[in-house]
Structure formats: structure tokens, C-alpha cells
Amino acid sequence: MKTTMTVNGQASTLDLDPRTTLLDALREHLNLKGSKKGCDHGQCGACTVLVNGVRINSCLSLAVMHDGDAVTTIEGLGVVGALHPLQEAFLKQDAFQCGYCTPGQICSAAGMLKELADNWPSQETADLTAAIVATDAEIRERMSGNICRCSAYPQILAAIRDVVGAVA
Amino acid sequence: MSSIADWATPNPVTENRSGLIGKAVDRYEGPLKVTGTAPYAYEVEAPSPPVQGAIVTSAIARGRVAAIDTAEAEASPGVLLVWTHKTIPAQGARGARINPRSQRPSSPVMDSDEVRYFGETVAFVVADTLENARAAAALIKVTYDELWAVVDFPASLGLAENPPGEEDVRIGDFETAFAAAPVTLDETYTSPIQNHVQMEPCATTAWWDGDKVTVHTSIQMVKGGQHALAETLMIPSDDVHLLTRYIGGGFGGKGQSYDDLSLAALAARELKRPVKVAYTRQQMMLGTIHRPATIQRVRLGATPDGRLTAFALDGYTHCARDALFTEHFANFARSLYAAPNRLTGHKLVKMDLPGAGPMRAPGEASGMLSLEVAMDELAEKLGLDPIQLRLINEPERDPETGKPFSIRQLARCMNEGAQHFGWDRRNPKPGQVRDGRWWVGMGMAAAIRADYLLPAKAGARITADGTITLLQGMTDIGTGTYTILAQITAETLGVPLSQVRVEIGDSNLPPAPGSGGQFGASTAGSAALDAGMKLRVALAHLAVGDPNSPLYGASPDLVTFDDGKIRFGNQSEDLSTLVARAAPEGVYAEGSISPPADRRDVSLHTYGAHFAEVGVDMDTGEVRMRRMYGVFAAGRILNAKTAKSQITGGMIWGVGTALTETNSVDPRYGSLINQDVGGYLVPVHADIVDLDAVFLDEVDDKANPMGIKGVGELGISGAGAAIANAIYNACGVRLRDYPMTPDKVLAGLIAAGL
């Protein structure tokens, strides 16, 4: 099936097996291997990408569902030498070890920052009418779909905190 | 003959003149990892686009494949190859070694119709795409002749035997001393099967060039994988080029190779094109090794003032019928507390399950879960603070061997941790502190993990531009190997970090044992230090023998290296200038480490103390970690940043161990029930609140030439017990069965009338 997506700002038309997941389309057809396959069924978050600015598990989505969508992967956030602030912060805070969940963590964090800015509530949000404060608890809750088995969680929080800024 | 006494001589790492050792430098390969451009095994560029494999696994625990129908799969679109035990090419016999020096024997896949565990490979498909391969794999119909299988561990203890070559270790007369002890404790603790759950599933990309195969695979031990594949393919190991540059988590589970390696190599040979094969998450859970369950009995006898007179830790664990492994949960206890009368040992049940094997701190991670809770229970019986009880029983020498400790700062870890954590605010009486609907409590546990040093080699090369490359068949599984090797090399040669490159994960490079047993940094790093020293010697001789060098004629023994320069007195030149002029082809030197025999004459361990504060929901029994702090003594720290990440990662594994992580065998099928991370619950962001750790200043000059020790496994050792003790302190429910899930806590709360 012909599918056209804008991936990291570039329009791509792919002729895909309809069973191909968005994750496999990125990895196997567009050579964007930064998005990782950890569980292939939406439990680990390693495949997280941004679709039209919203984070999703790309393994749970068929590529042909994304005709006309704008997809941003880790490769679209920043490159060696010109890192995204989150990538810079992950590096500085040692917010990864084996590195396999890292692209998903960073894409997820990027999506989360927008959700916070757009005042999307989470289970941790006490007051749905007030502006959301990016507390540590909010960040942890919202990042809990991204598993890091090396368990760099304190360092990931610190990296995101570097970008969000301190909260009073 | 070398001796540990030789290590007292200063070297560039111990002198640390430019201060790179210990410095919190960013990860060497970090920019690649944060940009998603580090290629893992399934992602490497092959000479031509690889076709993809899919594995079909068994649905019984023990028996034979009676019939297997592959007709539909073979006719399925895009299918290039379908193999079963009947059609797979010849492989080396299981366990055989053609080359007697192979570190690992042949590990054939589908070598017979026999099924040995639920999840064993029974068929394999390669197709042009993953979608076609998986669809075809789903069309394969297997029928089995099923045999009775041993899959229920607690019900099979009657089959337990001593592990081969092992007997219980007895010192003094435990039974008599225990019977005579004024205060005793006799409790049994259980820990479940655990899975490694590395984020990257096992994967291999393979291609052939004539008789030689190149494999990129995800494995912790380069030589082991290379040799196992060579034996399986029945080819010389020199014909196997194994690369493992980036590894998405290992934790012991990738210490060996799996069927993806053999299948990718065999299929690439058959199809004459690159093939890649990955395990699914479910196959990772079912078909790779796991940490086995344990049933541990702890018996402690003490005097009323808290002196241990009798000590025993023994019990049961299990392994696969034909893949011997013992989770040595009692070994650590032989070095931990003083007691004149002692008994430790293991009984092993051989079962029809996937292989049991090493998982982060094998032995300590399980065993400390029992003893460190037992010590908490005994302290309460004695009316002593748990730290005080441990201090009373601090041994002066290794309690079983009588060997001197290289250095032992366990007491300091406990004391400093207690002070920082606010241990004095703990109410020793449980169930006294409430925060809303939460019972709040504190617990602590000691940590100990043995320290090892293995033989290894390394190479160091300087090229005409002054770049120094450290070359080693070592791996970085997230531990920081790349980074610490760069630091050691830069410090040794007196050059800035930016001038150093590190190439590891390649079977063509000087061999190192790989990542495991927290021996990686000590072993690989010591060889890297020696390679650097050998390169210094070569460069010194080059300079003093070169009439065009300002160092010409100087004594090579008095030459120094700093700031990218080679120096003698007030004469110096840039290393790059020297090499470009006198050896434009570059200079290469190799070094090695081999543990001196007298290293065995000291008791070598890393130590620590864990402190945990938890909340227990009074209505649901849910336990939440609120605060955790650890103090560790692990020798000189090479990199403050990566070492801390290792240790906090280990502590978080302790949180998972205490609260959520468990697998169970379905006795009907012999399968592991949790087959993904929806069922097998590893800690997530929301589970980890306020967690920190520090290292004591320490140098262990008996451990290796650098005075460092391992940190990868110390953090988990004891961590789960600290949480278990905090649960008791919070609500008065003493659980001895891990993990401490709400159902167990709630049952305890109800039983206690709470």
C-alpha cells in the first residue's frame, strides 16, 4: 500500500505491506534505526516517536494508518554535534546506560513537555483547573510508559528537570 | 612470578596526575546513544539488505516433536527457507569441542526431535520481510509426544542433590551450638524465578564471505560467542568474526549465545545473503536463561548480647536438567559475619525448564534477601538496633578461611549511611508511624559482593596524528566500559581524553573475558593500563633512539608523559610529532593482566549498606518506596558518573526484587507464566522516588594494579532485604516470600487485625 508520511521534515512515499508497523517502516524501510524494538507490543516504550507532535508507541501502530502524518523520530530531534536540549541533558546527567531505551525516553520526554505546556492532566494532577506544575511526581508518572531496565530513572528525571527547570 | 605486592608500585592510574581517573566524564559513546545512531546487532549495515528470520518455539516442556507440517509455511509469500530438526544443516554435536581450546562448546539448534523446555526452538523461517517470516512461522503445525516433566520446584525438592563436586561447608559444630544458643532464629525465605528483561532482545545479523562468517550479535562475552558459533558450525574459530559493539543490556543473560546466532549464521550460509534474526520479547522470557527460584533456611544462634554463636544458611535452588548452574545463595555468607559454628550449602533440583543462569549478582542477589532479613529479625529478638547487631558480629578476618580482608569498610558504610539517612529517627517498634493512609517504616541491610580479576589482554596503538586507540575484545553492556577504558588510556599516556579512541566488541581484538561478575572494569582496565605502559616504553625507546628527537640519547626509563608530550628533563616533543616523524606507520603495543597466585590469599569483596523508607497502604497492602540511600565501598572509582549510575541501577533492581518482579511456572505446561513486561513487572519511573548513593573514598591495592573494584552487582546485593525490613518496620507484617506484593502484605495486615 502506498503511504506518504513526512518523517523528520522529509516527505517519503513508501509502498508497504499493510502489516508493517510504523516502527518497522521507520527501521526497515527508512533506515531510521534510532527507534528501538524492545517488546513490539506497546509495553516498554523503546519505540516512542512523535506523530503530529504527540508521542505514541510506534510498534502499536500500522504504518499505513499514518498517511499524511508528520512523524518525528530521535534522528529528527538532534544529531551528533547539534544535540536537542534533552539529548544534551541526557548525556550530561548520564541518563542512560545500555542506551537501548534512550531514544524512546527522549522522544517521550519531548512529547511530555508539550503535554505539560498544553495543560494535559495526569493521574498525579491534583487540580484540573489550575495550570499544571511540572513536579517530579508529574514527570515520573508521565514517563512511566518508558521502561529503562538499566534503571537510570533518577538520572532521567534529573535530565528532564534540567530542561524543564526547577519547580518551586 | 608476579605478586599483589607489585601493585603497591605507583602507576599512572594510581598517581592520577591529570585527574582523569575518578572524574565524572560523559560517556564516550553517549552522543551516539542519545541520537539513536549507535547500531545494535539487528541494525548494523550488512553488505546487502538482510532477509529476516522468525523462530517457532515448543509448546511443551518435555517430549518429542511427533510431526511437523511446514507445507503451508513453505508456500507462504516471500518465504526463502523453512527449517525443522529434520532439515537443518549438520551442526557440531551438543557439548562437543573440535578445538579443545574453545571456551564454549557447540550449541546446536534443532539437533534432534527432543524438546527439553517450553520455548525451545522447533522450527525456523526466513523470508524477504519480517511480516512474511512471522506470518509463515504462524502456519507451521507441530504435534508432540509429551513426556512427564519436572516443572514444579517446591513439589520437587525430593529430587534435590548436591551440586556436582560440592558439599555443605561446615565450620565448628553448628547443630550443637544452635541447640545451646540462648537466642535463636529459624526461618525460611523464598525468592522466585526472575527474568533479566534486557531492553534489547537477543539479535544477530550474519553474512558470509567465502568460508568466513561475520556476525554482529548482542553478547557479553566475545570469545565465548565466537567459539560457540565456530564449534556449532564446525569451522575454525578464526573463520568466525564476531562483533558486539553496542549491547542493549545484558545483566548476565547475554553471557552466552542463543539460537539467533546459530540460525542467522546457518541461514546466511544457505541463502548466500545476509540474514538477521531477533528473539521476540516472549521468546526472551521463555527461551533465555533466568535467575532460578530459591528456598533458603536461615538459622541463627546468639548470646543475649548479640554475639552469633551458630550460623546456617542452606536450602534449595534449581537448574535445567542438562545445563548445570547453581545459584550460590549461601556463598557470600561465608565472608559476612563472624560466628564460630557455621553451616552453608546448596541443594539443586534439575528441572525441565529453560536454563537457569547468572543474573546480576548471582548468589548475593538471592542470598542476601534471606540473611539480611533474618538479621533484622534477630536484632528485634535481642532488642538491638540492626546496625548494632551487625557491628557486634564484624569479623576481623574472613570468618571461614581466616584470610585477611584486603580492606573492609562495611562498618563505615553502615554508620555513615545511618547518619545521612536519619536512621536515629526510626522507631524500632513497628507500626508506629503513619502518614495519612500509609504506614511508614525504615529498614536497612548490609551489602557484600565478591570481587574478581581474570586474565585479559589489550592493545594500544598511536597513529601519526597522535590519536591513541585502545583495542580490546571487551564489551560495554551499559556499564561504561568505553568510557573508563578511554580514561585509563588517556591518563596512562598523559594525553587529553579527546585524543583517545576505544575499539571494543570485536573477536579480532586482543581478548578480554567480557562483562560479568562485576569483573569487567578491573580485568579489562588492568590490561588496558598495561597496554598503555607498554606503549609508553615503545615510545620512549623510539624517542631516545631518534637523532631528530630532542630526547635523543636520554635514558628511556626516565622519560615521562604528560599533556600530549613525551618529556625528559626540560626537553619534550608532542607525541604526534614524534610518531609522525619516527614511526609514521604508527606504534602498537600489547599488554595483559593475569591475577597473581597470592591474590587468593586475601578476602576480596565490595561492601555497602542500604537504607530504605517505605509506605504501606493500610487498605490495599500496596508498598511504595519513599526513600532509598546507599553507601558503598568499592575501591577507587574510575568515573564518578558511570559508577554511580551502575550502583543506583543495582539498587533499583533491589526495589523490583522486593516489590514486583516474579515469574512462575504454569504446572500444566511447564511454561513461564509472565511472558512480557505487562506481566513481569520491572520498576518504572513512578516506582522510584528519592534514591541516592555515595561511594566511600577507598583504594584496594590488593584487588588489581589500579586499586579499583567492581560496582555493577554490589548495588542489588542486599537492597531488596532493606525494603523487606522497612515493610516490617512500617506495618509489623514480616514477609519472607519475595516479591512482597499487595496480596501478601494485605493478608498479613488482616492476620494482624489491622
Image (cartoon, grey):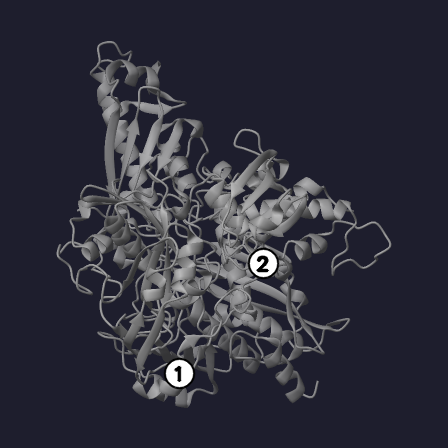
Q: Residues within 10 Å of mark 2 (few under 14, many from 20)?
A: many
Determine if marks 2 and 1 fall on one subunit.
yes
Q: Chain of mark 2?
A: B
Q: Chain of mark 1?
A: B
Q: Position of residue B729 (x, y in %)?
A: 63, 75
**Above or below, comparing residue B402 to residue A147 in the picture:** below
Q: Nearer the viewer, residue B580 or B263?
A: B263
Q: Position of residue B196 (x, y in %)?
A: 44, 62
**Above or below, comparing residue B104 to residue B392 in the picture:** above
Mark 2 or mark 1: which comes first in sequence? 1
Q: Nearer the viewer, residue B352 or B292?
A: B352
Q: Is residue B749 visible to us here?
A: yes
Mark 2 sits on what residue?
B629
Q: Position of residue B396 (x, y in %)?
A: 38, 64
Using the numbered discs, state the Cα–Cα distance from disc 2 to disc 1 in whole angstroms: 37 Å
Figure quadrant of residue B338: bottom left
Task: Say what secondary structure mark 1 lies in.
Answer: loop
Quarter of the image that includes the C terminus of chain B: bottom right
Q: Nearer the viewer, residue A113 or B669?
A: B669
Residue A11 as seen in the image, left or right of residue B665: right
**Above or below, comparing residue B526 to residue B224 in the picture:** above
Which mark is drawn over residue B728? none
**Above or below, comparing residue B63 to residue B604 in the picture:** below
Under mark 1, the amino acid is: Asp
The mark lying in front, picked from 2 and 1, is: 1
Which mark is drawn over residue B152? 1
Residue extending furthest toward the top: B548
Under mark 2, the amino acid is: Tyr
Q: Position of residue A104 (x, y in %)?
A: 56, 48
Task: Say what secondary structure mark 2 lies in.
Answer: strand
